[in-house]
Image (cartoon, helix red, strand yellow):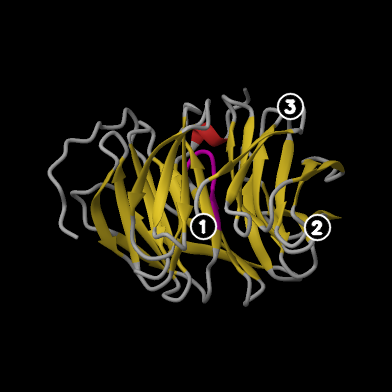
Amino acid sequence: MASIDICLPTNAKAQTVYVISQSGHRLTEIASAETPPQTIDLPLGPVNMAASCDGRFLFVTHPELRKISVVDLAQRKVRSVLPYPGMPFGIASDADATHIFVTDWNRGVVSRMDVANGKITAETKTGRSPAHVVFDHGRNRLFVANREDGTVSALDATSLAIVATIKVGKAPFALAFSALAARVYVANVQSDDISVIDARSLHVLATVPVGKMPYGVAVSSDGKKLLVTSQAENDAVLLDAETLASIARIKTGRYPEGAVFDASGHRAEVANWFSDTVSVLDLDHAVEVQRIPVAEGPRYVALAPAPSLCHAD
């Protein structure tokens, strides 16, 4: 679609959106609407990624290759490729990017890996088919969505001991964490809803219907807005994150998955898996304003630098 001439707020600090394309095995860097996207070649089959807090690195999982790429964003190249003894899927980074936390889709574990040497320093069984993982830096805690068990595991990030196993909806997949709101948002693909977990008490606060096949979820840096993508409906629902009331549904490309807010909270980007595009959404007007072509099979988006993900509350 053509761009619509709507003025969007500018960010106080420049941030870049990164998109991984699974079939096209590329990382696309979108700095602004006015700047042509840049691309970085990746090993085959990238699925998920995590940005370091300072924006120096992206860590990318390749399940079929059993590898993890460390991408140097300043150099725009893969700095190293770390072997992994399983099928790495979800990934998160600690605050100083010395360790990454990786979920293994096949073995049902989460691993802590030393980035410098690729050694696994701890590993714990979670549930079946662990998908996304997020890091609550304030409480030094990980949350892992166990798709085939309908649970979320909460773990101590140092020992990887399980603190709680939280029952959520059917087929939990994507997670978003808000440090300011102390909430974890869980997209439950097969029950067509999201679960809202209190990160302090580890209890489910609410379950909210959001549309068919919610595969992506994102929360704004101020913790006030929530965006959930619906693959079966080719759109995204914008919610008030405090009241959980629906604000609007916004059309996207086909099979939207990963989503991310920019720093202002007025704009979001969504990866359209089957359209090979990224939708740019103006959230104030609840409309898609741009659709950016990317390599085949875009599945996940991340913002870098992303200091709001690493702040303790």
**Label 2 or label 3, whichever comes before in sequence order:** 2
Residue where numbered disc 1 is placed = 212
Q: Residue furthest left?
A: 5
**Label 1 or label 3, whichever comes before in sequence order:** 3
x, y percent for residue 130: 72, 59
**Label 2 or label 1, whichever comes before in sequence order:** 2
Q: Secondary structure at mark 2?
A: loop
* Residue 182 can be seen in this image: yes
**What stretch of residues is rendered in magenta?**
49-55
x, y percent for residue 97: 61, 45
Kindly report the distance in space between the C-alpha atoms of the residues bearing marks 1 and 3.
29 Å
Residue where numbered disc 3 is placed = 200
Task: Name the residue at 42% across, 66% down.
Answer: 273
Residue 13 belongs to the span the image colors magenta: no
Q: Which mark is residue 239?
A: none
x, y percent for residue 163: 85, 39
